[in-house]
Amino acid sequence: MLFQNKWEPSLNYKSLSLDHILKIGSTENDYLKNITQFFISELKKCDISCIEEVIGIESQEDQLSILLEAVRDGKIDTFCYPLDQSPIFEQNESLCISAISKRIHCGEGVVFQSKSHHPSSVHELQKGWKLAVFSERQRVQLTSLFPDSTFTLHPINEKTDIFEIFSEGIDGVVISSLDYHLISQNNDQLLSYIPIHPSELIPAPGHGVIAYICHKEDFVTRTILNKIHNREMVPIVNNERMVMEASANEFHNKIGVYCYEDTRNNFHIHGFFTDTLSKFRFSQNIVQGLGLKLMSSLLPK
């Protein structure tokens, strides 16, 4: 199901936040560890005590599935994960997204190795660059924007190493701004990044937002997470993710949705679907209904 903000915190919220120590799941993967460290820093700002529980992962195992199972088994209380890569939980499932962050870094762009010659702006990408992408959504949109460049589609998971991709003769790799900031924490002198506006390269639904996943009936953890929950983002990401929820699973890496509120408090939503090359934008002064408008226009009947 979509993220919902109907759950209310316990009356004992204040005492719970002081007395309980959250067990936060992580793995040895640098990408996930950086997300977890962000999570822990946000909790500490709110005076919430927590410890990191590192779960051993075999090299071929799906790290998201292992973390989900660790919550179900009670080995950890919660873990954090990028919302655009998080599942939509059904009503009968035991887990839920209990809180979300603000949108930290918006959109996607191209990362280059700093030691190599690279363009000073995204407009120079038209000069025949070889770029790696991770979805049909990226490839089709960028082919239209930069017809003189070539694009190689790569599989992506938590173990993806962009430096290995560079070793294959690739000039640049297209990733989200959030992914770049997480990766560059350990490689700040090795990488350079050029952003592309999200209205031009429409990202995956929920991009740039961190989801905090826990057991639906763990009211202690949900009460604590409520303290860092960003309620303003709920209608934004719901409008984005309802489009993905309405689509078939095979379409999920072919759909881009970007919803936002401008400085005049008007709301806008952009959508793209690779199979039909359809691109739509809707605007109105209330956020409700934007996802439905996009869904009815974007997806095949």
Image (cartoon, grey):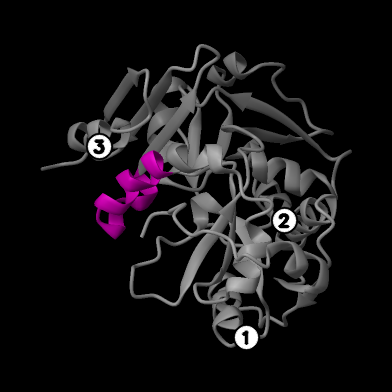
Among numbered discs 2 and 3, the one appearing first in the sequence: 2
Judging from the image, what secondary structure is the residue with disc 3 in?
helix
Specify whether residue 201 is in view. no
The residue labelled by disc 1 is 74
Foreground mark, 2 or 3, reads: 3
Q: CA distance from mark 1 to mark 2?
A: 21 Å
Does 219 sit above or below residue 189?
below
Quadrant position of the N terminus in the picture: bottom left
Residue found at the very far bottom of the displayed protein: 73
Task: Tell which circle, 1 or 3, labels the residue nearer the N-terminal end.
Answer: 1
Magenta residue check for 250: yes
Question: Relative to 130, does residue 225 appear above or below in the rendering?
Answer: below
- Picture coordinates of residue 139 (x, y %)? 43, 37
For disc 3, the marked residue is: 292
Vertical position of residue 119 compared to residue 115: above or below: above
Q: Secondary structure at mark 2?
A: helix
Q: CA distance from mark 2 to mark 3?
A: 31 Å
Location of residue 178 by image quarter: top right
> Do the residues bearing badges 1 and 3 touch, measured as CB atoms within 8 Å?
no
Residue on which disc 2 sits:
35
**Does residue 284 appear in the picture of this structure?**
yes
Mark 1 closeness class: few <14, some 14–19, many ≥20 residues within 10 Å: few
- The quarter of the rendered structure image containing the C terminus is top left
Where residue 23 appears, x then y in whole percent? 74, 75
Q: Residue at x 43, y 53 (%)?
A: 4
Task: Write down the region rendered in magenta.
Answer: 238-254
